[in-house]
Image (spheres, helix red, strand yellow):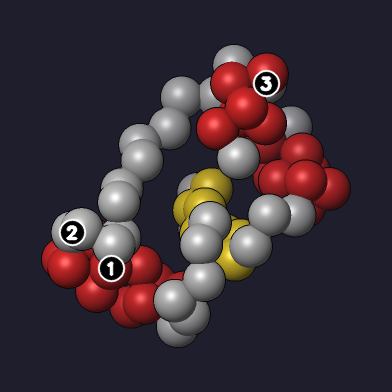
């Protein structure tokens, strides 16, 4: 995911949901999943690595 976003010059904020319980709680609240990566683009939530969907949302 990091490489994917960096290749597209996308700024992002990374949270370690293993070590940060508050970040994990927010991720589950937003996505209703515990799957990583979970990416929020605007109002859209992408659970898992879905390059086609991410490219569409980022364009």
Residue 31 place in picture, x, y as percent: 46, 74
Foreground pick, 25 / 57:
25
Give the residue number, with chain letter if any, for mark 1. 24
Using the rendered view, name the quadrant where residue 14 is placed.
top left
> Mark 3 against mark 1, which lies toward the viewer?
1
Mark 2 element type:
loop
Residue 9 place in picture, x, y as percent: 59, 16
Whether residue 45 is visible here, answered yes or no, is no
Whether label 3 touches label 1, CB < 8 Å: no
Whether residue 7 is visible here, answered yes or no, is yes
Whether label 2 touches label 1, CB < 8 Å: yes
Foreground pick, 43 / 50:
50
Foreground pick, 58 / 4:
4
Compared to 48, does 54 lie above or below?
above
Give the residue number, with chain letter if any, for mark 2. 20
Name the residue located 77 percent from the left edge and 39 percent from the top edge: 55
Spatial separation of the CA atoms under disc 3 and disc 1 = 26 Å
Mark 1 element type:
helix
> Mark 2 against mark 3, which lies toward the viewer?
2
Residue 1 place in picture, x, y as percent: 60, 40
């Amino acid at each position: 995911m990091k490489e994917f976003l960096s290749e597209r010059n996308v700024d992002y904020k990374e949270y370690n949901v293993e070590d940060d319980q508050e970040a994990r709680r927010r991720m589950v609240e937003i996505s209703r999943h515990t799957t990583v990566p979970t990416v929020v683009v605007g109002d859209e939530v992408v659970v898992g690595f879905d390059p086609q969907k991410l490219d569409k949302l980022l364009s």
